[in-house]
Image (tube, rainbow, N blue to C red):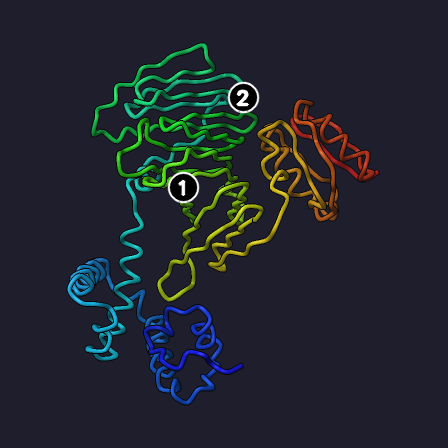
Amino acid sequence: MKDNFKKRHAEDILTDDILLDKIERNICSENAIMENEFALASDIHNQINKYKNTLDPKSKQLIGTKIVRSINSHKRRKLVFRISSAAVLLLIVGISVLFEIGGESEIRTFAKNNSLETTSNNTRLILSGEKEIEINTDASKIEYAGNGNTIRIDASEEVIQNVEANEMALNTVIVPYGKRTQITLSDNSTIWLNSGSKLIYPAKFAADKREVYLEGEAIFEISHNKQHPFHVITQNVEVKVLGTVFNLSAYKDDHTVNTVLESGSVELKYRSNSIFGQSKAAMVPGMLATYDPIKGNIEQTQVNTSHYTSWREGYFIFKREPLSNILKKVSRYYNVSIQLNNQEMANETFSGQLDLRNSAIQVLEVIAEIMSVEVESVGNQILITRI
């Protein structure tokens, strides 16, 4: 297949995923006009991969500052034409550094410095002033007033939190395994937190942005505000939303981060193996985006979104799902330990609906009938054995 990019230069090649892939696979251009540009782009790419991690933080910051000044005073195209290939290398490394420097938001920093873990069997609401409230219901509700000062819990308890006009008062909800929580934020967005999850969020959003930080799994129903997009930040993926419904699963002990879009549109920003160290991907309704932090990429597939959001309604839906994945979800939902006496069963699949109003044993007995296995309680564990 011949190249259709006759007028592309090295800097264009390095920002084009298709052409960059050719360089990484050592495929030369079939267009004679572009041979020199491919060679230059290849040299730059190789040098970046070789040296981009050797700079100390102070040098990176200095480069970042210089790049910002250059970008503010020159058009990118004119600048590239006027500088040598060595300066092009500096520019691209600098932009890569800027991605890293600019990606550290206040709420992400707070999450890193406040690694609160589940130390209770009850849901915990921790206010910015370190006041802590325990909620003992299995499925609780937390509602914020528009000013962020009044918090209603399960329609029976009211908590007052004094939030100054310009203050970023970050609250945290920690939901242990076996519990769930529905939160209505000050902007009227609603979040359903699944078992074993943590959400950090402002009691009242700032005028210029709406950001929350998630560990675990949640369904988001975001109130529309075109001027102020909503951002959900996780350890590896950031989701930008205008107004939509989606499920985001980012448990620490899972190998991937999964985003399922039910309605609206979202944009995912994630760390990748690209030359800039960061990439973006847009989603449309009905799609599942799976991010693999090891591979540094996202794969999208079409799915039935109800299979990923049905836990909000009190049931699980599975279609040819490996038993290992099912048991992990059931274990989190009920806060029980489930063991297989034969690990070969882990890859066997199950299709069906599980009613989560029943006990863990009753739910697993539905699986047992179909898969010809036996379920029994042994001490503090549930054991599944082949019949």
In percent of the image, x 31 and y 23: which residue is there? 130
372 in relation to 312, above or below: below
Q: Which residue appears farthest toward the bottom when viewing the image? A: 32
Marker count (numbered): 2
In percent of the image, x 50 and y 52: which residue is there? 291
In percent of the image, x 37 and y 76: which residue is there? 46
**What residue is pinned by disc 1?**
242
User: In which quadrant will I find the N terminus?
Assistant: bottom right
Which one is nearer the viewer's eye here, 58 or 22? 22
Q: Residues within 10 Å of mark 2 (few under 14, many from 20)?
A: some
184 in relation to 65, above or below: above
Which one is nearer the viewer's eye here, 15 or 62? 15
Element type where label 2 sits in the image = strand
**What residue is pinned by disc 2?**
139
In percent of the image, x 45 and y 79: which residue is there? 4
Nearer-N-terminus badge (1/2): 2
Q: Amino acid at mark 1?
A: Leu
Q: Position of residue 239 (x, y in %)?
A: 42, 45
Callout in the foreground (1, 2): 1
Q: Residues within 10 Å of mark 1 (few under 14, many from 20)?
A: some
Q: Position of residue 41 (x, y in %)?
A: 35, 78
Element type where label 1 sits in the image = loop
Which one is nearer the viewer's eye here, 320 or 363? 320
272 in relation to 109, above or below: below
As measured in the structure, the alpha-carbon distance from the residue carrying label 1 to the one carrying label 2 is: 28 Å
137 in relation to 38, above or below: above
Taking the image as shown, residue 133 lies to the left or right of residue 352, namely left
Q: Which residue appears farthest toward the top when viewing the image? A: 156
Q: Position of residue 90 (x, y in %)?
A: 24, 70
Taking the image as shown, residue 46 lies to the left or right of residue 72, namely right
Q: Amino acid at mark 2?
A: Ala
